[in-house]
Image (cartoon, rainbow, N blue to C red):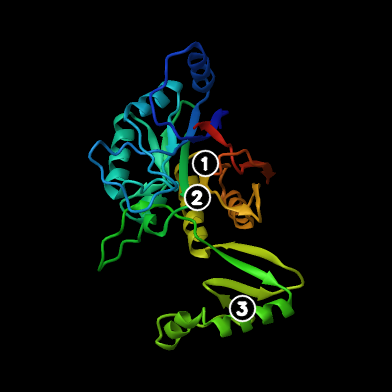
Amino acid sequence: MAALSLVATGDSFITRRLADTAERRALAALIGAADVRFTNFEVLCPGEDAAPNAVSGGTWARAPEGVIADLAGLGFNMVSLANNHTLDYLHAGMAATGRALDAHGMLHAGTGRHLADATRPRYLETASARVALIAITATFHETAAAGQQRPDMPGRPGVNMLRHSTTYTLPPDRLAALQALAEESGINIAHKLRVKEGFASGLEEGVALFGGHRFQAGPAAGIETAANKHDVARVVAAIGEARRQGDHVLVSLHAHEMRGGEKARPAAFLEDFSRACIDAGAHAVIGHGPHILRGIEIYQGRPILYSLGNFIF
């Protein structure tokens, strides 16, 4: 297989056109020398009349369509569209952005008409290899998640999502005190009623609930996170398909989640998920989201870039 060169950047939160400067032309020469040139496109081009969502990814991120031409002029040929701003202008804004990227010949992944479409790999043909891109976000509002299509129901447009659970660990005496406080305050009454009426499942042995947060006993206080096994399996299957159809597989992962209060350290479930992607055959995991640089791990001889920070912000 011929050698392949890759340039990858983090977040392009680009909201206005770029000036034509010597610095920009030098940067374009650097990026354009690679076969594959990736950035995370973290704004929307929804058009002037797009209605904003009731919620946003922090602010309602929008830009004129010309910014796509500017990114293409810098040399980029593939982007992720799966992030916490994808549904800032509802499904119409997401679809309009996808059409704008298509019109400029920019390969994009991570969104779709339903969950299978949002998950599927997109392929870039280069002179030396066929490269697949799978894009996913762990940071998203629940209304942005794409829905699976069924025989009795159409799918829901949205993002390819990586859900996760969080469990807080407390020493046994502190957990007992928390359970007593929950009983006294009645904070779990609504959950108990849902269980009684059959709309929710009871808790596993050794797990306590407090206002929607899960707690378990342990030797010391701490936080444990775990990726949703169904989401991991779905992406692993997509990587398998991409390995059969292409030469190289890239996984784009947008994630703000941190370990404890350390923003520079990814949450444990992100590390586990990224390694699972490499185990499944991905050649690199390209992370972005927290707007800072995070560490790089070489796992099984392949790079996991936990966050490349900002490219344009």
User: Percent from the top left, x then y, of residue 115?
Assistant: 37, 56
User: Percent from the top left, x then y, of residue 117?
Assistant: 35, 51
Q: Name the residue under label 2.
A: 239
| Left or right: 258, with 249 as reference point | right
Between disc 1 and disc 3, the foreground one is 3
Q: Do the residues labelled 1 and 2 touch (CB within 8 Å)?
A: no
User: Which quadrant of the figure has residue 70?
Assistant: top left
Relative to the observer, which residue lies in front, 38 or 42?
42
Q: Which amino acid does label 2 sit on?
A: Ile
Count residues near mark 2 (Cα–Cα under 10 Å), then give few for <14, some for 14-19, many for 20+: many
Label 2: state its secondary structure: helix
Q: Residue furthest top?
A: 22
User: Percent from the top left, x then y, of residue 31?
Assistant: 52, 23
Q: How far apart are marks 1 and 3 (CA)?
A: 37 Å
Mark 1 or 3, nearer chain start: 3
User: Percent from the top left, x then y, of residue 240?
Assistant: 50, 51
Relative to the observer, which residue lies in front, 272 or 12?
12
Q: Residue furthest bottom?
A: 196
Count residues near mark 1 (Cα–Cα under 10 Å), then give few for <14, some for 14-19, many for 20+: many
Residue 54 vertical placement versus 228 (above, below): above
Q: What residue type is labelled 3?
A: Val
- Check residue 168 in the rendering and tell me which mark sits there, or answer none: none
Q: Can residue 129 be seen?
A: no
Label 3: state its secondary structure: strand
Q: Name the residue under label 1.
A: 250
* Residue ID at (22%, 40%): 49
Q: Can residue 27 be seen?
A: yes
Mark 1 or 2, nearer chain start: 2
Q: Mark 3 points at which residue?
A: 207
